[in-house]
Image (cartoon, helix red, strand yellow):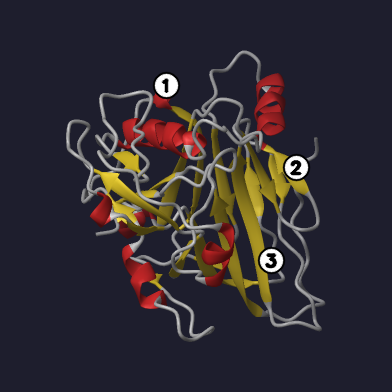
Amino acid sequence: MAKSTKRSTSLHPPSTSALTLTFSGPFVYDFARIEKDKVVDVYAPYCPYHLGGVFFSLNSLSENDLWKCAQSRKPKEKLERAYLIRSRGIKASRGKPQIIVPKYPKGLSFESLKQTIRSTGSTEPLGPRKDKVLFKFTVPNPKYIYPLYFDHVEVVEKYDKDPENAKISAHSTGLRFVYSWNAHTPIQLVVPSGDTFDIEPPVFKELPKLADIEIRYQGLGLADENDLHSDARSCFASMAVLAGVEWWLNYGDCKSSPTNISHGSKDEMNAPGPCEAMNNRMTMENHTGGDCHAAAIVNGLD
C-alpha cells in the first residue's frame, strides 16, 4: 500500500468549492475541541451486524477492511480504531458551527429543524470508555451544519422517567458538515496504521462546485416485525452509554429500550398510514428497522 504523494497544482489555479461531510447512521458527535483544536470527534458505538464505510463517488472504502489492513501492517502494536480526515485545502472553523435550514421548498416548518439536534448540555470532551466505541473519526470543524433524516420520537432523559407521547417531535438522525475547500487539493483519510488514502470526491465543471463525502454506518437492512424501531432503539442505547447519559427513545408504541430499565408509554399512538406520511414531510415517520435512524447525540455544541 503506497502512501499518497503530494500533487502538483501548478496547472490549476486555486478554486474554492463547497465540501460536505455527510454522517449517516448512529453517531455521537463531540464538538468540545473546536475552540482549541478546530476538530470534531465523531464516535460510532458497537451495534451488532453494523458496518462502516467511506463513500466519495469515485470509490468507497470499508472501515472494517481498513481496520484489518492497519492491524496487518503493524501487528505488534496496540492500535486505536481511529481515523483522521485532513486536507490543507479544507478551511476549518474555530467557533461554533452555524445550523442552517433550506430556503426551498417553501411552506414547510424548516426553522424547527434547528431544534432537532439533541445536545448533552456539556462543554467538556466526552472521553468515552474505549470498550464502548467501535471506531472514531476526527474531522475539521465545519462552518455550517445541516440536520438530516429527521424522525418523530421523544428522547426521554432518565431511565426511570415516564415517557410523554405529547413530547414526541422531530429529531435529526444524521448531520451534514459544510466546509470551504480548495478543490485542487487532496483530501486524505489517515488510518490507524498511519497509512493514507486519497478520498477527494469529483468536482464537475458543468455543475455548481459542491462535492460530498459520506461516512455511513448501517446494519443488515432487515426489519423486525415485532418492533419497526428495534435497530434505532438498540443503537441509541449504546450511543447513550457512550455519551454518558441516561437517555432512551419513546416512539409512542408502548415499547421501551430492551437493554435498560426504561418503560414504554401507557397509551399507543396511531401510526400514520403510508400515504398520509408521504403527503406531509414534516410528520413522516421513519421505519427504522435495519437502517438505524437513531436520534443523533451531540456534545459541546450548546
- Residue 157 in the figure: left or right of residue 242: left
At x 57%, y 32%, the residue is: 224
Residue pointed to by mark 1: 131
Q: Secondary structure at mark 1?
A: helix
In the rendered image, residue 77, in percent from the top left (x then y), is placed at 57, 17
Check disc 1 and give the amino acid type.
Asp
**Residue 138 higher or lower than 117, as above or below:** above
Residue pointed to by mark 3: 185
Disc marking residue 3: 2
**Residue 56 higher or lower than 250, as above or below:** below
250 or 67, which is in the foreground?
250
At x 59%, y 41%, the residue is: 217
At x 60%, y 59%, the residue is: 87
CB under 8 Å between discs 1 and 2:
no
If the image is split into quadrants, where does the C terminus sit? bottom left
Q: Dot 1, how many residues are within 10 Å of its Cα: few (below 14), some (14-19), or many (20+)?
A: few
Compare marks 1 and 2 and give the one earlier in the sequence: 2
